[in-house]
Image (cartoon, helix red, strand yellow):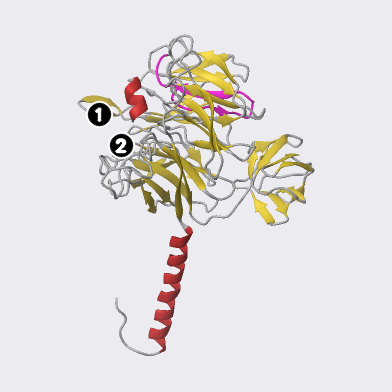
Amino acid sequence: MKNTTQQRNWISRMRGAGAGAVLALAAMLALAVIATQTAQAQTFTTLHSFNGTEGGGPTTAGLIQATDGSLYGATAGGGANSDGTVFKITPTGTLTTLHSFDGTDGASPWGRLVQATNGNFYGTTTGGGANGDGTVFKITLSGTLTTLHSFDGTDGEAPYAGLVQATNGDFYGTAEDGGANGDGTVFKITPTGTLTTLHSFNFTDGLDPQGALIQATDGNLYGTTREGGANTCLIGSTNYGCGTVFKITPTGTLTTLHSFDSTDGANPFGGMVQGTDGNLYGTTSAGGVDNDGTVFKITLGGTLTTLHSFVGTDGATPYAVLVQATDGNFYGTTKNGGSTSCPGDCGTIFQITPGGALTTLHSFDGTDGEYPFGGLVQNTNGTFYGTTNGGGANSDGTVFSLSVGLGPFVETQTTSGKVGAAVKILGTNLTGATSVTFNGTSATFTVVSKSEITTTVPTGATTGTVEVTTPRGTLKSNTKFRVTP
């Protein structure tokens, strides 16, 4: 993973008569109709094939939906200088390259962008910068990039993961290498670029963190390390730690919640997502019953449950973070496995219930993309969007969409705040909105565009769903907005 080339190049017949038989047949026909409607509702579309000059090889970055309604992402390679790009793509597939890295300002961005409350994007690169050890950058919606910090090894090296903006306004992230022990770090950085190393891993508490952090409802940050921990796993011909799940306070106190032991998974690359039930959900790239990776659930206190072990035909090597959709189910990708005959198999898109029932929704075949490292994002139009590292018309990766029949909704930025706090609401077709409520309490608001509303948390609001009434109907938020004291 530390080799730049590898970084960039990485799926009964019924009998009898009578009323009972007629009713049974009617029930079967009804189920068949439902199944047919479900199948018809699922639509996969390749929106764009990268060609190298505009970017190539998008990895774990994935996509995010911004306030202007477009999707934004990064590629680890390609662009004007072959050092990767930041791009914008509309939900219908029109792509614009916003920035090509040149090494001096960073190289090979792997992590997902985050749009901050100030409207700008923030991200990381795994290499380049003043010391060649990676950077933290800010980029505007129009593409003006500013390097905020260049890592020098002592404060971290090779940040693979994206950032998370915490409720205090600062950003938190991880670096795979460097720090006091050379095993990676957790850091905090202000919007203006002041970086503080909060924790240096020491193998026993984790090694090589590559997934993004998440701030849970308890205010703490949670993440994973790819290696290290109490248990060892054989990787190739060498024993490494199987990886960990950890909790860290915003001030830097770290607690190891779980050390994987291969039977329950190993080597988690992606971060985690907090479900509506309060638990954290994630994936491991290896381990489980067939060593093809797992999906797991873990409580904030550290009790882990393996929900699913991949076996190749239903996917293998899941790298990316999951997303919980508006139907309550989780959706994700596997880098390998699936039902096609690509070398190593091309990867899959899957759905999994909170209870662990998994359905393979799509198996890539190379022509429509291969090796989806990155996770999915559910756009406020209800459709999922994602990227593949390779395949497509030019073998440089793709951007795709997948509709499973879920309807439109609204999303709040941020997802929590005090009474009076400013909140942005993202959606589609918001023009003409007549009402915004926080768990039933009306709020004053301004329609900025068809994709954005600005508002403030109203007096008397309580934790619950945000609803926006438009001429086309009422849209509900995908998660509850948490009103803080």
* Residue 176 falls within the magenta-colored stretch: yes
By secondary structure, the bulk of the magenta-drawn segment is best described as: loop
The quarter of the picture where the N terminus appears is: top left
Q: Quadrant of residue 259?
A: top left
Type of the residue with mark 1: Ile
Q: Earlier in the sequence, mark 1 or mark 2?
A: 1
* The label number, if any, that marks residue 235 in the structure image: 1
| Residue in the image at 59% along x and 14% along y | 194
Could one spot residue 76 in this view of the protein?
Answer: yes
> Vertically, is 416 above or below 473?
above
User: At which x and y percent is residue 72?
Assistant: 54, 34
Q: How many labels were placed on the picture?
A: 2
Q: Report the span colored magenta.
A: 159-178
Type of the residue with mark 2: Ala
| Residue in the image at 54% along x and 14% along y | 149
User: At which x and y percent is residue 403?
Assistant: 49, 52
- Give neighbour class at mark 1: few <14, some 14-19, many 20+ (Cα, 10 Å): few
Label pair 1/2, CB-CB below 8 angstroms: yes
Residue 54 lies left or right of residue 430; in this view the side is left
Disc 2 designates what residue?
Answer: 286
Q: Quadrant of residue 126?
A: top left
Where disc 1 sits, the SS reads: strand
* The label number, if any, that marks residue 162 in the structure image: none
* Residue 35 falls within the magenta-colored stretch: no
> Vertically, is 331 above or below 67?
below
> Vertically, is 19 above or below 85?
below
Q: Quadrant of residue 460?
A: top right
